[in-house]
Amino acid sequence: MDRFDAMQAFVRVVEAGSFTKAAETLHMSKTTVTQLVQQLEARLRVRLLNRTTRKVNVTADGAAYYERVIRLLADMDDAETSLAGAQTLPRGRLRVDVPSPLAAMILVPALPAFYARYPDIQIDLGVSDRIVDMLDENVDCVVRGGELVDQSLVARRIGDLALGIFAAPGYLARHGPPDHPQALEDSLHRVVGFLWARTRKPMPYAMHRRGERLQVKGRYALAVDDGNAYLAAGLAGLGVLWLPRYMSRPYEAQGQLVPLFEDWRIDPMPLYLAYPPNRHLSAKLRVFIEWVAELMALHAPVINRHDS
């Protein structure tokens, strides 16, 4: 038995709650994962997991062993990448999930510079706005806009996205420009609705101008749950959009989007990078987080609240 492989298999079964899911993320057969855990239990002479036909639960001894093992695996990872004089750069696979527009417009175009620094890191990049079960899906980190509701995650604020309101020229030709944000609530105008993952509902946007403050939700004919589809709907003239400036900028320059209510302010959207508290901040994850933070500092720096 390879004790290192056995410990890794045990950790993944605990985190995934299933031998099948653990085997998928480890790229092993279910039989191999099962045998590794059984051999580990035989060596330790203690039951680490309780198995039923429907689920796998960690025992009290298994929970205590899990906490020790994840620290040990973390130390082993650090030892390989931080030895004095070591010639190796951080390496290995990272599983990351980010919003689709951020991936397409900022992250992916900048990746050649990341790989120039860290050629041995392999990234499995999920692009979505859905809620990701990070432990179940073995995801190392996610990037998300808006306030985080899952307080169990370790989160780092890496940006503040300036927002604006926009419409396509075709939409404005048909409906006319709205003269006040509240006009988006009446029967004449439409917005494109964005279905936020945690509620599956569009959320109102807070706007303010010279002491006047209101929340606008708007009426929609179409609501979507993906950022790229949301932008495409606005470009097609299906309604008014609230967009981060990094998304709107190229389309404003080409005349495909027209800014509205420029004398009104919208609070910026915080952007967070988050990872599970029991997910060791390995060298590869640490350098990726620092790189993303550097990248967003160029595109959407965090606003100092004391200065705003």
Image (tube, rainbow, N blue to C red):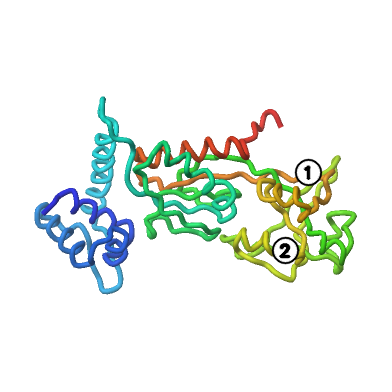
Question: At label 1, which amino acid type do we have?
Answer: Arg
Question: Neighbour class for label 1 at 10 Å: few (<14), some, many (≥20)?
Answer: some
Q: Residue at x 61, y 49 (%)?
A: 146
Q: In the depicted view, which residue is nearer to us: 35 or 49?
A: 35
Check disc 2 and report the residue beneath it: 192
Q: Residue at x 10, y 57 (%)?
A: 42
Which image quadrant is residue 51 in?
bottom left
Question: Neighbour class for label 2 at 10 Å: few (<14), some, many (≥20)?
Answer: many
User: Where does the C terminus fall, quadrant-wise?
Assistant: top right
Question: At label 2, which amino acid type do we have?
Answer: Val
User: Where does the N terminus fall, quadrant-wise?
Assistant: bottom left
Residue 265: assigned label: 1
Q: Residue at x 87, y 63 (%)?
A: 173
Q: N-terminal of the two: label 2 or label 1?
A: 2
Q: In the depicted view, which residue is nearer to us: 234 or 164?
A: 234
Which image quadrant is residue 228 in?
bottom right
- Residue at far top of view: 84
Classify residue 129 as left or right of residue 34. Answer: right
Give SS at disc 1.
Answer: strand
Classify residue 305 as left or right of residue 276. Answer: right
**Where residue 149 sits in the image (x, y, percent)?**
54, 52
Residue 73: assigned label: none
Q: CA distance from mark 2 to mark 1?
A: 20 Å
**Where residue 187 sits in the image (x, y, percent)?**
85, 69
**Where residue 116 sits in the image (x, y, percent)?**
42, 38
Classify residue 296 as left or right of residue 280. Answer: right
Q: Is residue 82 shown above or below 129?
A: above
> Given contact means CB atoms under 8 Å apart, are the residues at marks 2 and 1 in contact?
no
Give SS at disc 2.
Answer: strand
Q: Is residue 256 shown above or below 118?
A: below
Q: Residue at x 46, y 47 (%)?
A: 153
Q: How many marks?
A: 2
